[in-house]
Image: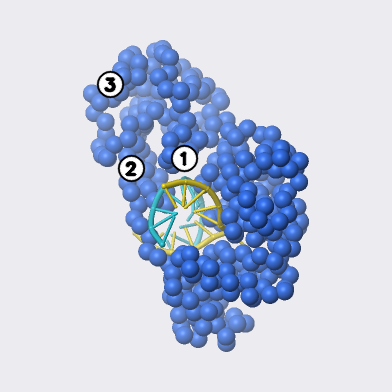
Chain colours: A blue, B cyan, C yellow
DNA sequence: AACACGGGGGT
DNA sequence: ACCCCAGTGTT
């Protein structure tokens, strides 16, 4: 793991932010890229947010990147680059919650705070036979207290890594290695045959469908992008001018003409048939239909969130997966 | 306390 | 389909 070879709190912080809700196998390459592009907190602080978001593209939950960047500016600017070394100061950094503060505190500074992540919740809910949903705050506190008690005066870093590794390698979500487990004799979950019932989780809500009708408007090598600034998914990433509605069915030709005229694109020619892509998010399923038009001249852009970009420069903008996929598959653009 | 927030991979 | 991922911020 990244922190196995270092006590550098910056590198540990970087890896922990990247690995929030992200498998090591997915985050590893991003960690290496960020260390390469931003070897110190000063490098990260000096970068533009756009550049950081672009490097983050494909990882998801990109408020992590924005909070991390803001925290880097704070550390570099206000703390002269010296990473905070107490639990409460670490916890005060943007994007750092109880888990990450405990991880950084224990790994980098040997502070005695137990980590409580998905692994720990699974291991301890099984071992102690906890049948309340682990996502409840009360259960979380219970598990945290048990972890603190188990840590005792052991080495915090060793303890935290051990319990998480145990969850990741032995006490796995499915097909856990109970038969070879050295703790099966004292594991309540194993003794009561509840291992495959634990941890209990509250039922999840079903995904809401959303229908985006995107306009890919180009004029020669120029393309119109829109920066997403609303309180919504994909904040500060780029997509295209869009109409959202409740219908899966295509915009009629008349609807499209009205949209184009309304925004000053009276002279527009359809350049290809509409194509549809879908993208699953945790709480939403996005159904996007793309309409491509070539416009003869570009008027003054009607919104300040709209930007003109050269096709050659698209690689500098951070796009949601579904937009990146459209650009690459339909236009060969990266 | 409940909810929103991405994207990937396994079964 | 559904689950999970070395969780956090907002309401």
A288 or A330: nearer the viewer: A288
Q: Is residue A266 left or right of residue A45?
A: left
Q: Give the vertical position of A249 relative to B6 (above or below).
A: above
The spot of residue A228 in percent (x, y) is 46, 33
Picture disc at residue A210: 2
SS class, disc 3: helix
> Mark 2 to mark 3: distance in Å?
22 Å
Q: Chain of mark 3?
A: A
Report which residue position mark 3 lands on.
A257
SS class, disc 1: loop
Q: Residues within 10 Å of mark 2 (few under 14, many from 20)?
A: some
Residue A2 visible from this viewpoint: no
Give the residue drawn at x 54%, y 31%: A317
Report which residue position mark 1 lands on.
A234
Q: Residues within 10 Å of mark 1 (few under 14, many from 20)?
A: many
Give the residue drawn at x 37%, y 48%: A284
In this rendering, the label closer to the viewer, 1 or 3: 1
The spot of residue A124 in percent (x, y) is 55, 74
> Mark 2 to mark 1: distance in Å?
14 Å
Q: Quadrant of residue A315?
A: top right
Total residue callouts = 3
């Amino acid at each position: 793991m990244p922190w196995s070879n270092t006590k550098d709190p910056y590198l540990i912080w970087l890896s922990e932010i990247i690995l929030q809700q992200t498998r090591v196998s997915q985050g590893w390459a991003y960690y290496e890229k960020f260390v390469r592009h931003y070897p110190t907190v000063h490098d990260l602080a000096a970068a533009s947010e756009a550049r950081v978001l672009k490097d983050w593209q494909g990882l998801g939950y990109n408020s992590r990147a924005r909070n991390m960047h803001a925290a880097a500016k704070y550390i570099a600017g206000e703390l002269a680059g010296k990473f905070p070394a107490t639990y409460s100061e670490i916890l005060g950094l943007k994007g750092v919650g109880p888990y990450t503060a405990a991880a950084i505190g224990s790994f980098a500074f040997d502070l005695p705070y137990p980590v409580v992540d998905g692994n720990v919740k699974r291991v301890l809910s099984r071992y102690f036979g906890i049948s309340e949903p682990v996502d409840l705050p009360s259960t979380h506190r219970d598990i945290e207290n048990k972890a603190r008690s188990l840590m005792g005066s052991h080495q915090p870093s060793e303890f935290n890594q051990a319990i998480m590794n145990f969850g990741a390698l032995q006490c796995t979500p499915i097909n856990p290695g109970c038969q070879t487990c050295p703790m099966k004799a004292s594991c309540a979950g194993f003794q009561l045959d509840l291992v495959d019932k634990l941890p209990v989780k509250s039922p999840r809500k079903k995904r809401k469908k959303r229908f985006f009708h995107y306009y890919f408007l180009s004029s020669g090598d120029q393309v119109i992008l829109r920066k997403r600034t609303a309180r919504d998914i994909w904040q500060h990433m780029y997509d295209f001018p869009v109409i959202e509605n409740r219908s899966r069915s295509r915009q009629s030709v008349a609807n499209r003409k009205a949209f184009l005229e309304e925004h000053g694109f009276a002279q527009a020619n359809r350049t290809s048939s509409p194509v549809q892509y879908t993208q699953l998010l945790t709480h939403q399923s996005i159904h996007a239909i793309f309409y491509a038009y070539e416009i003869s001249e570009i008027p003054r852009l009607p919104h300040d969130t709209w930007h003109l970009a050269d096709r050659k420069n698209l690689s500098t903008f951070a796009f949601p997966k579904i937009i990146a996929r459209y650009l690459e598959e339909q236009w060969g653009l990266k």
